Amino acid sequence: MSSKEVIDVLLEEDRTFSPPEEFAKDANANDPKIYEEGEDLEAFWAERAEENIDWFEKWDEVLDWSNPPYAEWFINGKLNASYNCLDRHLKNGRKNKAALTWEGELGETVTYTYQTLYNEVCKFANVLKGLGVEKGDRVAVYLPMIPEAAVVMLACARIGAPHTVVFAGFSPSALAERMNDAEASVVVTCDGYYRRGNVIDHKTKTDKGLEEVEKLDDVIVVQRAENDVNMEEGRDHWWHELMADADRDCEPEVMDAEDMLFLMYTSGTTGKPKGVVHTTGGYLTYATTTSKYIFDLKEDDTYWCTADVGWITGHSYIVYGILANGASMVMYEGAPNYPTKNRFWEIIEKYQVNILYTAPTAIRLFMKWGAEYPESHDLSSLRLLGSVGEPINPRAWMWYHEHIGGGECPIVDTWWQTETGGIIVSPLPGITELKPGSATNAFPSLEVDVLDEDGNPADSGYLAIKRPWPGMLRTLYNNPERFENTYWSKWDNTTYFAGDGAKKDEDGYIWVLGRVDDVMNVSGHRLSTVDIESALVDHESVAESAAVGVKHDVKGHVPFAYVILDDKAEPSEELKQELRNHVSDIVSPIAKPADLVFAPDLPKTRSGKIMRRLLKAIANGEDMGNTSTLANPEIAEELQAKVAKEEVAATK
Ligand code: PRX
């Protein structure tokens, strides 16, 4: 599909939805003047930082943007993120309020109040200190959706040791690669966890990764599934044993606003993941303020974000932004269809969830399962719905609105990235008129535009952010050149290049179309084509490969690969499966190609660059467009015929 056709599909739905009167009346943001206030960038953020964050020492200057693209926010301000998420709520009436209610896949429930969460965080902070972790040391976290993940993050924040959370679904080598890059010598993991009723042996997987870690001191193991695991004497420690002896008092470290809060690795267009650096003052102010206005958090609300803590959404909108607001949230360990396809709706009913934040891929899956599941539950507690991770097609938007929101809940379609720290383009639910499929407008004070190749405003082009914001990444860990080149070199060094294509309509609404680079979005998870290609060429039978994203009804995209075999290897169905499994083992099951074809060669430009655009069109069964610039145009046609003949599964 050409981008023109994509836009046409997006625009098929032309109904608009105004904020319901009742909702707007009490909304945290209900006066459009907030957009005018945002025009004064520094005054706007100074006010929010004072209102939403407790500082040990106030800043001298709101923003220093004199050395772009390096920004500094709240200069000389001193604070602690865990203090803001915990301690201050012990004194403001929220001591006994539920902070985090966790539901395991087996149905068990644990509730932490602000007081008990504080106790656990302080104890674990002391455990880390006891192991010699100091301010500035990086701590790796390789945990699934269990409350200890939030405890570790906040404990790290408490002592000023930046955490780097690696998604538990990632492979052992992904863990090792991130730990080595972050120079983290301590990791928190677990014995196992539940997925569709099965115990996933996470410790064995962790150990496999740790074999490749260059400098390793301690491994802390949370006991979740009680599966048999190997504990290495002197290196591995049980969480519960360390916690049993830990002191409950731990003063929060006084952190500078620009001290690193955490590192989060994300896929880029080369094989090596990028270590996105977020700092304390700006990030926390941004995550907290956007949570308050976009999710309209109220004292009595129960909020549920279905993302994993291993992704940025879990950082900003499960842990930091939500707890800093003193809200109550639900965290669920397992799969949406275990033991039945009713699981999400049962959770909403059980905890009377008011705000649900999930991904289009999940919504499309629920659509496929059928409306009878949500309809057999009372979802009337819901008052606001959110979407994140990829463009939400209008049909899914309408289904979400009607079948989950009962036609009454505003939907906030939130566009942002690991790098942006928090939501950038989104409706304010008490103000914005919604158009299904559009993330609508930039958050107050942000200046987002659609630019053409030369940096001129255009109706259709690249999404760009033209002003700094407090949650922006500060750099890429140990790699400032890559930071400058990836985000700040397409136009000028004050305009952020997001890597997404977008359209702006006649009302100035933003319609995000998806990535323009070699990054694909599988079920809302960001993967690089290079990750998949490197895994394929790692196999002895593979000489060369190219991976592309193929559109998928539920997952958004699925990976598809073209493989050129080594001369000694013979193509076969078995080898195909072996290669697919190889990618799954090396990268993650998410990255497993839905299908692959053995190719005699790949279409290349005269300078030898693989034409992925063409391979993407072929895999998607689309028109190949102009092939005249190819060094080998015949191969494109050959591949096209092959894909059609083999009825490649992914294309259906
Ligand atoms: O392509 C955009 C897509 O997800 C990418 C960022 O991925 P990641 O850093 O993993 O963060 C995901 C969670 C914030 C973006 O470049 N994306 C995210 N949200 C949306 C979206 N695309 C369209 N609409 C969205 N609401």
Image (cartoon, rainbow, N blue to C red):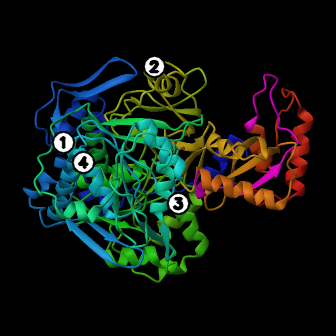
In the rendered image, the residue lying farthest to the bottom is: 376
Q: Label 2 crowding class (10 Å Cα cut-off): few <14, some 14-19, many 20+?
A: some
552 up-or-down from 193: above or below? above
Mark 3 to mark 2 CA distance (whole Å): 36 Å
In the rendered image, the residue lying farthest to the left is: 91
Residue corresponding to mark 4:
131
Task: Name which quarter of the figure residue 63 lies in.
Answer: top left
Q: Label 4 crowding class (10 Å Cα cut-off): few <14, some 14-19, many 20+?
A: few
Which stretch did the figure color magenta? 587-612
- Residue 163 or residue 625, whichever sits in front: 163
- Camera-nearest label, 3 or 2: 2
646 up-or-down from 447: above or below? below
The numbered mark, 4 or 2, whose residue comes first in the sequence reads: 4
- Is 433 displayed left or right of 452 in the figure? left
Give the number of the disc on residue 278: none
- Is 576 displayed left or right of 43 in the figure? right
- Camera-nearest label, 2 or 1: 1
Amino acid on which disc 1 is placed: Asn
- Camera-nearest label, 4 or 2: 4
The quadrant of the rendering that contains the C terminus is: bottom right
Q: Label 1 crowding class (10 Å Cα cut-off): few <14, some 14-19, many 20+?
A: many
- Camera-nearest label, 3 or 4: 4
Judging from the image, what secondary structure is the residue with disc 2 in?
A: loop
